[in-house]
Amino acid sequence: MAARSPQRSDAPWPSRGGPRDSARVIGVGLFLAMLGLWQLATRFEHPEFILSPIEIAGHVVEALRSGELLAHIGASLVRALPGFVLGSLVGVMLGLLAGVARSLDQLLSPVVFLTYPVPKIVFLPIVMLWMGIGDPSKIVIIALACFYPCFINAYYGARRTPTIMVWTSLNMGARRSQIFRKVVIPSSLPLVFAGLRVSLALSFILLFSTEMINARSGLGFLIRQSESSLRFDLMYVAIVAIAALGYASDQLLLLVRRRILVWQEATSR
Amino acid sequence: MSARWPALASALRRAALLAAGVLVWELVARSGMFSPIIVPSVTRIAYQLWLLAIQPESVVEAWYSVFRALSGFALAAVVGVALGVLMGRSSLAAAFLGPLFSGTYPIPKIALFPIFIYLFGIGSLSKVVLIFLECLYPIVVTTHAGSRAVNRVLLWSAANMGASRTRILWKVVVPAAAPFIFAGLRIALPIAMIVVIITEMISSADGLGYLAMYALASFKTDRMLAVVVVIALLGLALDWLVARLRDRLVFWERLDAYYAE
């Protein structure tokens, strides 16, 4: 896939004011236009559960000021972050190792690829049964879901290491551990980051759904609670917080990726 | 392991691993370390699985789940491929839709589910809409990448031989992007299964997700695990179907991977 990416042929250092900046301008403009349309539409008769953007913004500021929202965000992050870190760390390490070591490959890959299409959320009831309905069961499910994309991407990344590079470093007398650290890991990093990005998105999906199913705190719980008590203002506040959290963490990951993969012109999507 | 039969060898390895896993589970269950509610034995799970298979009402529940997952997925496939090809071949469409998709991509769409319940009711429609939305993104992204990467020489020669724009789209762009499209479909299908189970667990009175939560709430762990096995098998079977369809349709090239860059 990478070899055919059209951006490759462009200049290696994109100048400011290039196509990406104009895309950003169009994107922001489109977003504002949609908000404006929404605001206009709420001037007409509408069901009670639809609020206008200005109302929602007011409620968000209010909830932030009272500190209630921050407590729920904190509770959600305490579940999502350990799960994401644990699952993706184990996934990337095992994936890279399975990509280079045949014995591990034959032991692990069949299991991982066989169970990959199974929706991991089905294990939530079992994990709840074994670990209780508290935070550990949510962290385990998030880690489990994050493990798969990371393993698979790291596995393919390691296997796609150009043979010539391995031969060259062997020729220059590199040891196996050196080749792993200096050749295999850098060359698989682009795919590893792609896997991390998928895992990050998955971790948020699972976080909010586990919180909606059972929790006493967190943004998913806030949505559920406000929905059932017809507090639509709080519901929108929680939704905005979730969207902002998902967007911010994704941008953070992309930033880290741009920092680490300086040699690869990060193809944004 | 014989080098002459690599497929057979890997199938045997999988079967051996599976058998080992089942054996360990049964030994743990029989050892008496845990109560049968925490770890029910394999035989009891198998018995519940048999009950699920012969009870018509549980088959109906499974059908609800599959129907929701597949209708959302099919809608997303049709719309997503159309949008992706459009974005890949028209710079205007890419300029407008590109930022829209990349901006909303990292936002967990599941947060919108409560609004969807109010908008579309608590039945199937709200779930199908959410599945459609979650599946749309990977399909659009991969189709976009695929239709951008079409070999120019093919486009030029088709145009040179007098093909119209729509004809080029159908006969050159879509087939050339097909490996990418199928990669996107294979990413989207497990997502459809995840979302259908989640939404049924959160709010539903039917479907397999509801069945699992109901069995758990009534401490019928063996039945819950049987439902989990059914969901897992369904996920595997649907993925297998998409992979076989791809092998038939895209026989010349494969992106045999679950990843997209």
Image (cartoon, coloured by chain):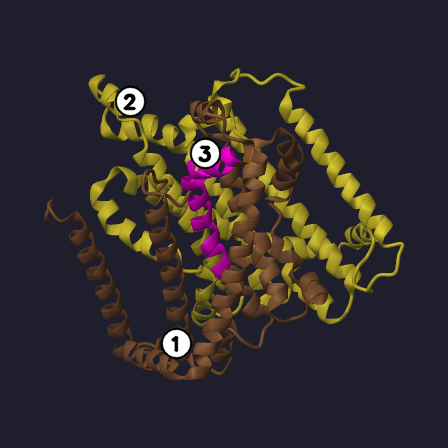
Chain colours: A yellow, B brown
Q: CA distance from mark 3 to mark 1?
A: 56 Å
Tell me the residue that label 2 is attached to.
A165
**Disc 3 element:** helix
Q: CA distance from mark 1 to mark 2?
A: 51 Å
Outermost residue on the front side: it is: B162
User: Is there one chain holding both mark 1 and mark 2?
Assistant: no
Q: Position of residue A77 (x, y in %)?
A: 59, 52
Question: As drawn, is A214 to the left or to the right of A183?
Answer: right
Q: Amino acid at mark 3?
A: Val
- Residue at 66% of width from left, 40% of height from top? B100
Q: Which residues are magenta?
A: B167-193
Question: As drawn, is B104 to the left or to the right of A8?
Answer: right
**Callout 3: few (<14), some (14-19), or many (20+) C-alpha neighbours within 10 Å?**
some
Q: Of tags 2 and 3, which is closer to the observer?
A: 3
What is the chain letter for disc 2?
A: A
Residue B27 position by quadrant: bottom left
User: Is there one chain holding both mark 3 and mark 1?
Assistant: yes
**Disc 2 element:** helix
On residue A41, the disc is none
Tell me the residue that label 1 is attached to.
B38
Q: Position of residue A72 (x, y in %)?
A: 67, 57
Tell me the residue that label 3 is attached to.
B172
- Residue at 61% of width from left, 59% of height from top? B129
Question: Toward the viewer: B254 or A96?
Answer: B254
